[in-house]
Image (cartoon, rainbow, N blue to C red):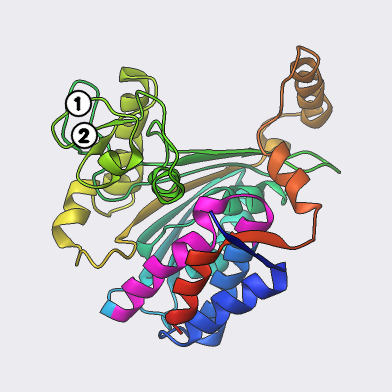
Amino acid sequence: MTTVSLTLDEVFELANKTLLANGCDEETADTLSTLIKNAERDGSLSHGLFRLPAYVSGLKSGKINGKARPVISKLTPSVVKADGKNSLAPMVLKYGLPELVKAAKENGIAVLAITNSHHMAAMWPETEAIAEQGLVAFACTSYKPAVAPAGAIKPLFGTNPISFAWPRKNKPPVVYDMATASMAMGEVQVAKREGHKVPIGTGLTKDGKETTDPGEIADGGVLLPFGGYKGSGIAMMVELLAGALVGDNFSYETAEKDTDDSGPPSGGEFILAISPDKLTNSDWDSHSNKFFEKMKSMGEVRLPGERRHKNRLDTGPRNINEELVNKIKSLS
């Protein structure tokens, strides 16, 4: 794979120019470009510039409104609703998260229910932002069918990621972000592009056969849930929380309504924030830090999010796939 070296500012500028040329206003372009830059900075390559052509496809088709603003409403003191109005999810989060954080700090617990939004980024940015405000966070979203339930060979679930973040005083929060699929589809697509194999158990061919070829999975095949029936159960939970509970579609309903332009489909997201200060009288921070220290003492254990936080300390250039960069430049 041939790469080109781009500074983080150049990553932002490349994304920003492309988004502005394809229907985004300045606020939307700046918000999404920052997210893309941060993904490259933190080593989340499958959610950085790699996603930009798909965003452009959705903007060009008119499915995504690059100038829309979400409508935020408070249904109860602890329930915040955000109608994305077909905007990109980072814009919904920009306006919705402050209201969620405020409600959780006032009431001890709060929910943000997002509908009509286009989410294709990593999920750690929203849960990490909530944890940086001293709150415990959980988020999940569905997608179009890509994952077969345990025992099936046809897709029903999206890759249905979940993210959890735990706040730490004067330290970066502990954050994990994972697909309930055996591997995120973006990672499978990156493996296909770069000619890497994937482990057995990642997915099946279109004929229902096991394979290590990411192309056979991405092009007409199907992903499998992680952990068999256990992962399948968690994927089902995400469908219910990010679909029926918030008032949006299940993954199969999303697919029926989508334009198949390769851009992110419209869907829902469920976000929960909890205040440990309200919930417990104990010193939850020192107590949890003792637990993390115990984990770290048991061998080569890395806390979730540590690698991302270490990567972001490096502010130097990043090596980006040259073919991808050229493709993005052609879009603007």
139 and 134: which is toward the camera: 139
160 and 107: which is toward the camera: 160
Position of 312 compared to 275: left or right?
A: right
Name the residue at 35% across, 30% down.
212
Q: Could you say which disc has been placed on residue 305 in the image?
A: none
Name the residue at 82% across, 28% down.
283
Check if mark 1's residue and mark 2's residue have beta carbons within 8 Å: yes
Please tell me how crowded label 1 is: few (under 14), some (14-19), or many (20+) other residues with Cα within 10 Å: few
53 part of magenta stretch: yes
Name the residue at 29% across, 28% down.
211
Please tell me how crowded label 2 is: few (under 14), some (14-19), or many (20+) other residues with Cα within 10 Å: many
Residue 327 placed where, x, y %?
Answer: 44, 72
- Which residue is disc 2 drawn over? 205
Q: Which stretch appears magenta?
A: 38-60
**SS assignment at label 1:** loop
- For badge 2, the amino acid type reads Thr
In the image as oriented, which residue stretches furthest toward the top?
298
- For badge 1, the amino acid type reads Lys
Q: Could you say which disc has been placed on residue 209 in the image?
A: 1
Residue 324 placed where, x, y %?
Answer: 48, 65
**SS assignment at label 2:** loop
Mostly what secondary structure, the magenta segment?
A: helix
303 and 2: which is toward the camera: 2
28 part of magenta stretch: no
